[in-house]
Image (spheres, grey):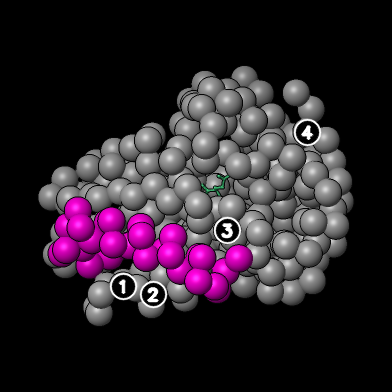
Amino acid sequence: MDAPIGIFDSGYGGLTVFKSIKERLPQYDYLYLGDNARTPYGTRSFETVYEYTLEAVKYLFDQGCHLVILACNTASAKALRTIQQNDLERIAPGKRVLGVIRPTTELLGKLSKTKNVGVFGTNGTVKSNSYLIELEKFYPELKVFQEACPMWVPLVENGEIDNAGTEYFIKQHVDNIFSKCPDIDSLLLACTHYPMLASVIEKYLPAGVTLLSQGPIVAESLEDYLSRHPEIESNCSKSGSERFLTSDSTDSFNSIGSLFLERPLNSEHIKIPH
Ligand code: DGL
């Protein structure tokens, strides 16, 4: 039976990716799941992120989804490969899980002229070295500088987008990454929450530096994936609907989520089975 495309994030961040996907591919149905009860993932261990992500993926498969996008860098970095290689065949043969890292590294490598790129991410994403490993495979000539920005997710989640306190933490990490290498010409926001801070981050960047958000890149890559995989595409239902599920309070999800999506939304509460 055909079913919506599942989109998963630890909380609200994946909504920045969902927004771009929906703009590019409005014909499909989507089921968004935010694990707000257990967010943040960025500070958690490999084992915990893997366990939580697998539970969420299973839940979305149980709702009928044939394809699940991990719209979360931390989950993509720490859980995607193991789920693809060890779990998928056993729990849901024929179903697919995709992440956000591969499509963004492809573009980041192509874009840089100085061959020095920067990656802003959560502690978990940076420590996993997933971006280093993935970029090394395709662009061995590239130098990658990473910077963990642990305050950025809580600032975004608390709606603290444009004020002096937020600017302090943004300037701090921008200065840090350019002190590692002044020649960085392309910077990736490798956390799906960070696009909410993009306009403030841009204020502190040297002229000529490109700041990349993942939403449009992932949306384009999904379109390409669906065109190359008719066996998956034909199982994705197409009535242009959307549903938002959260493992925590729907009131909070509706109010904070609408900031991410830039329009009102109505969420439903669910419990992710262990
Ligand atoms: N949105 C998640 C990511 O892209 C991070 C949020 C969290 O720490 O849970 O990495």
> How many angstroms separate mark 1 from mark 4 (CA)?
40 Å
Structural crowding at the residue carrying mark 3, measured as other residues with C-alpha within 10 Å and reported as few (<14), some (14–19) or many (≥20): some
Do the residues bearing badges 2 and 1 touch, measured as CB atoms within 8 Å? yes
Q: Position of residue 128 (x, y in %)?
A: 38, 34
Residue type indicated by callout 4: Ile
Residue at the image point whose x is 19% and y is 53% from the top: 180
Numbered mark located on residue 213 in the image: none
| Quadrant in which the C terminus appears | top right
Q: Quadrant of residue 28?
A: bottom right
Q: Earlier in the sequence, mark 4 or mark 2?
A: 2
Disc number lying in front (4 or 2) = 2
> Which residue is denoted by mark 3 in the rendering?
155
Q: Is residue 234 visible?
A: no
> Which residue is denoted by mark 4 in the rendering?
272
Structural crowding at the residue carrying mark 1, measured as other residues with C-alpha within 10 Å and reported as few (<14), some (14–19) or many (≥20): some
Left or right placement of residue 196 versus residue 205 in this view: right
Left or right placement of residue 149 versus residue 119 in this view: right
Viewer-closest of 29 and 130: 130
Left or right placement of residue 172 versus residue 20 in this view: left
Q: Where are the magenta residues, as a range?
A: 160-187
Element type at mark 3:
helix
Q: Quadrant of residue 212?
A: bottom left
Do the residues bearing badges 4 and 2 touch, measured as CB atoms within 8 Å? no
> Which residue is denoted by mark 1 in the rendering?
205
Residue at the image point whose x is 52% and y is 37% from the top: 43
> Which residue is denoted by mark 2 in the rendering?
202
Residue 181 to residue 25: above or below: above
Viewer-closest of 60 and 75: 75
Q: Earlier in the sequence, mark 4 or mark 3?
A: 3
Q: Is residue 197 magenta?
A: no
